[in-house]
Every structure is written in C-alpha cells, then in structure tokens.
Image: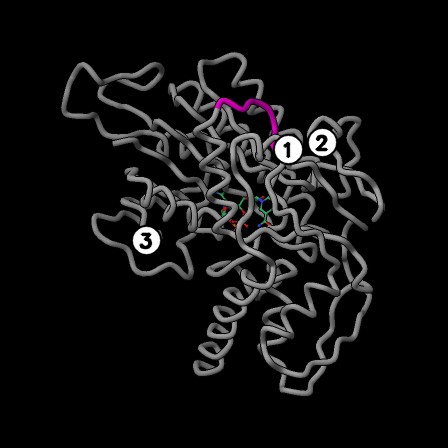
Amino acid sequence: MKRALVCGAGGFIGGHLVKKLKREGYWVRGVDIKPHEFAPPPVPPNIGGPGGQADEFLLLDLRDPQNCRAALTLPAPRSPQLWGVRGAGVGESTFDEVYQLAADMGGMGFISVAECEVLRNNALINIHMAHTAAEMGVARYFFSSSVCIYRDMQPDEPPLTEDDAIPAEPDNEYGWEKLYAERVAMAYGRRYPMKVRIARFENCYGSEGTWNGGREKAPAAICRKVAEAEDGGTIEVWGDGTAIRVFTYVDDLVDGIYTLMQSDLEGPVNLGSDERVTVADLVRTVIEVSGKRIKVKYVPGPVGVHARNFSKARIKSLGWEAKVSLKEGVAQTYLWIEAQVKAARKTE
Ligand code: NAD
C-alpha cells in the first residue's frame, strides 16, 4: 500500500485530496496547524484532532523544520531491510508521496492586507518541507502553486502558457511567494532523486471550504451572501462584475492533482476549467441556483487582476479535463453553504 502525506489536510483542497487518496487505496497521514472544521469525525487511530478521513492526522506548525521532519517520519516498517531509507534515521521511514498544500492564504480580502504573513509563513513552510522531504528520501513531491504567479491580462488576450510566467509580474505578494516556492521545489527536484510535480491552480471552489470570517474566496462569499439574503433583497459584490475568471470545482481539481502526480510531466502545469466567465456571470449563476430574486450592488473592494486566460494543453496531454460545469458546481456548493448559514443561525 502506498503511503501519502497531505500537508494542509485541515484545509479545503487538502481535505478533499485526503478523500481522493483514500479512494485510490493509499494509507494517508494528514497534517495541519488546525483541525479540519467541516470533515466528519475521525476514525481511530487518530492523533491530534479531526482530520477528515485520513488514517492519521497530526497537528503541527510546518514553519518549523523539526515539525516538517516529524510530519514526514513514519514508524519503522516490520521488515528490517526496509528501514532507514535514504536520509531517514535508523528505524524510520518516510512517505512515497508528499502533497504540499499548507499555506497561510485566503481570498483577495485577506491577501491584499496580510502580505507580510503570506510572504513569511508560506516561504518558511515551503523551504522547510521541500528540503526535509528531499533529505529524507521522499520519492514524489507535489507543490500547490497558483495562477496568481502570472501578470495581469486584458479580456481579449490569447492564452498564456506556463513559460509566459517569465518575465514575472504577479499582481500580489502571494503570487511572488508561489513563484519563488516553485523554484525551490524544482531546485530540490534537480539536486535530489525526488520527482517534483507542480500545479498552478485556478480559483477552486466547492463544499467544506472557508465560507465566512474574511478568508473566504469569491464563490463562497457570493454563495453566503445570497444564502443570507431575504428573497427580494440586495447583496453587495466587490468591483464592477467585469473581471474575467475561471472557477474550478474541487472534485475536478483533486483528480487533476492526482493525475499530474502519477505522471512524468515536469515543470509547472496550469490546472483549471475551460469555462471563462465574468464575476457578474458567477453572481447570476449563484442567484439562479438559489431560486431567489436578488438585486446586486457593485461596490469598491479588492478585486485583483482584470482577466485570466491560460493554456491547459499540458494538463490535457495527460487526458485530464474538467468535467463539472460552473452551474453544476455552484449548485452543489450553494446547497452546502446554505446549510452552514442555517446551522449558524440556529446556534446564534
Ligand atoms: P486552505 O486555507 O483551506 O488550506 C490551507 C491549509 O494550510 C489550512 O488548513 C491551514 O490551516 C494550513 N496551514 C497554514 N499555515 C500552516 C502551518 N504553518 N502549518 C501547517 N498547516 C498550515 O486553502 P486551500 O484553498 O485548500 O488551498 C490549498 C493550497 O492550494 C494552498 O497552497 C493554496 O495557496 C493553493 N491554491 C488554492 C487556490 C484556491 O482557489 N483555493 C488557488 C490557487 C492555489
């Protein structure tokens, strides 16, 4: 049985990835600085707190290199000849696959103000995890990057390929850190026998993710606002609705992560749906799915870049493509967020 470590398993995508890896037959350890808020209670044995459906879940701060080592260390397997894989201490072994998704992050509202935290915390996590994984002999290492590493675009521009990231001009510090962390991971992939795979995610949404509190991203925030509004009411949305985005449903995204990790595709790979929509389209879709009559007031706020358009040729070369339409994905997400809003009201 293959063993996988999911860093950031207490978060949105990490939580869904744990479930995917369990379906694929892996033994999975999750690690995070906090428990998963929405995943069902853990199945024992479990250490440290709820971790979705991971076989084991550790609560550790991965900014600390000692904690990275603890996360990566497995007890000795029964057979002594399997002990002490390259770099691991005597009586220790490490993981076949490491998925590094831990990050101090959120939507534009968070990223636009927490630039010091984003740069410091994420650089520490990514440097220490890549270094420790390579030293301990991990065979495959996945890093979750973002299309935030690209420059701003105009609505009618042709797609950018992965190579167009350079010369670099990300719109925010989150993107700069991701670009640096890609380079860290790739350097370790060159200098150690560790296969590194990197996906640049494009706006992921779905259930069991942050939906309130200030770190939520646009799809979750809009679903929450519509779910909270009375029929006939008005919601406020940042910007003017014309920004162009791609929203990728989480089930498609974790399938893409897994497909890429098992492949021979080196270098960063764009991972997202083909459906380019405006923020106004997203808002309309949420309102339609809710069945309510809602008016929209666009107000000033942190919006980010004007437009996104990226080639998906590399990930499609592996046979992957997004299967869930925006309407189908929003319908699932809205139902889940509406249930959270109702549950929160009951406890008020
Ligand atoms: P998330 O915030 O739900 O998950 C990240 C997890 O990392 C959280 O549970 C958090 O507690 C954990 N974490 C933060 N600091 C930590 C630390 N010091 N030690 C251990 N764990 C720590 O975010 P997500 O949406 O699931 O994103 C997962 C990854 O994908 C991140 O690297 C993110 O930058 C990247 N990404 C996400 C999107 C998206 O649309 N959601 C887009 C592009 C890239």
Q: Residue at x 18, y 14 (%)?
A: 81
Q: Is residue 16 left or right of residue 89?
A: right
Q: Residues within 10 Å of mark 3 (few under 14, many from 20)?
A: some
Q: Is residue 268 magenta?
A: yes
Residue 232 in picture, x, y percent from top left:
68, 87
Cα–Cα span, label 2 and label 1? 8 Å
Answer with left or right where residue 276 lies relative to residue 94.
right
* Image position, residue 175 (x, y; %): 69, 39
- Report how far apart the C-alphas of labels 1 and 3 lie in the structure: 40 Å
What is the span of residues highlighted in magenta in the rendered image? 264-269
Which residue is label 1 attached to? 313
What percent of the width, then of the height, locates residue 336?
Answer: 48, 68
| Tag 3 residue | 49
Between 99 and 242, the residue placed more toward the observer is: 242
Q: Amino acid at mark 1?
A: Ala
User: In which image quadrant can residue 103 be found?
Assistant: top right
Front position among marks 1 and 3:
1
Give the residue pinned by disc 2.
161
Task: Point out the tag, 2 or 1, that comes first from the N-terminus.
Answer: 2
Please determine whether, in this image, residue 344 is positioned above or below residue 273: below
Is there a contact, CB below 8 Å, between mark 2 and mark 1?
Answer: yes
**Majority secondary structure of magenta residues:** loop
In the rendered image, the vertical position of residue 44 relative to residue 195, given as above or below: below
Identified at 42% across, 45% down, the residue is 17
Q: Secondary structure at mark 3?
A: loop
**Label 2 CB, ligand 1: below 8 Å?**
no
Of mark 3 and mark 2, the one earlier in the sequence is 3
Viewport quadrant of the N terminus: top left
Q: Amino acid at mark 3?
A: Gly
Say which mark, if any, is on residue 197.
none
The disc, 1 or 3, on the residue closer to the chain's N-terminal end is 3
Front residue (pair 49, 187): 187
